[in-house]
Image (cartoon, rainbow, N blue to C red):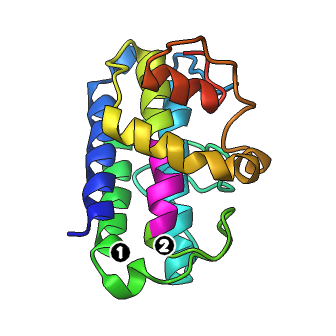
Amino acid sequence: MSGIADSYARLADAFLARVLATPDDRWNAGSPCRGWTARDVVAHVVNGHRGILAAIHGTPPVPAHGVGVAPMSDAPTVEPGADLAAAFTACRDDLLAVLRDPALAGRPLPGSPLGPIPVEQAVSVIGSLELLGHTWDLARATGGDETLDPVAVARTHQVLIPHHEALLATGAFDVSIPTPPHADPQTAFLRFTGRHA
């Protein structure tokens, strides 16, 4: 497996762990994402994965496991009794299969806010941003473990800096919040993405 696939797998597994740890009575809890509940955060991550996979394969995304389809930056509808863990697991496995296939991983990703970069590079930058940010959002909403992978946080923060304006224009995150002196790397990363850590 490539280094990018390994890194993606670790971040995806950390996100899935927060999904599985969410108590049933916390799915409607408000999240740091304006107007979204914990359930919406997970549905959004599933929806984003489906959008990337659809762009790679040239096929439209379809609802599954009780999670609908929406524009990439939105949170789709979630049916009562939806299996959010199964929905994310399916997307994770499909994206890992892409990253393990050199032909697919190296294919330019159409519609990327970073331009026509290879799929694996888009996953490394945008995928890491999404998984790290929304892992924290979900944990904050549900009282879960907010600790993020420090190596991934530091790497992703540095890689994002040149792309800040392009990603900000897509609504991927809010305007950065000033970071206090001597803030830890996780706080600096989250505030860079507009989160009140």
CB under 8 Å between discs 2 and 1: yes
- Residue numbers of the magenta segment: 121-131
The picture places residue 157, in percent across and down from the top left corner, at 51, 40
Is residue 188 visible in the rendered image? The answer is: yes
Q: Is residue 184 inside the magenta stretch?
A: no
| Residue carrying label 2 | 119
Secondary structure beneath disc 2? helix
Image quadrant containing the C terminus? top right
Q: Quadrant of residue 114?
A: bottom right
Q: Is residue 192 left or right of residue 41?
A: right
Residue nearer the viewer, 24 or 18: 18
Q: Residue at x 50, y 35 (%)?
A: 133
Q: Count residues near mark 2 (Cα–Cα under 10 Å), then give few for <14, some for 14-19, many for 20+.
A: many
Q: Residue at x 72, y 32 (%)?
A: 174
Q: Is residue 122 inside the magenta stretch?
A: yes
| Residue carrying label 1 | 98
Q: Is residue 47 above or below residue 80?
A: below
Secondary structure beneath disc 1? helix
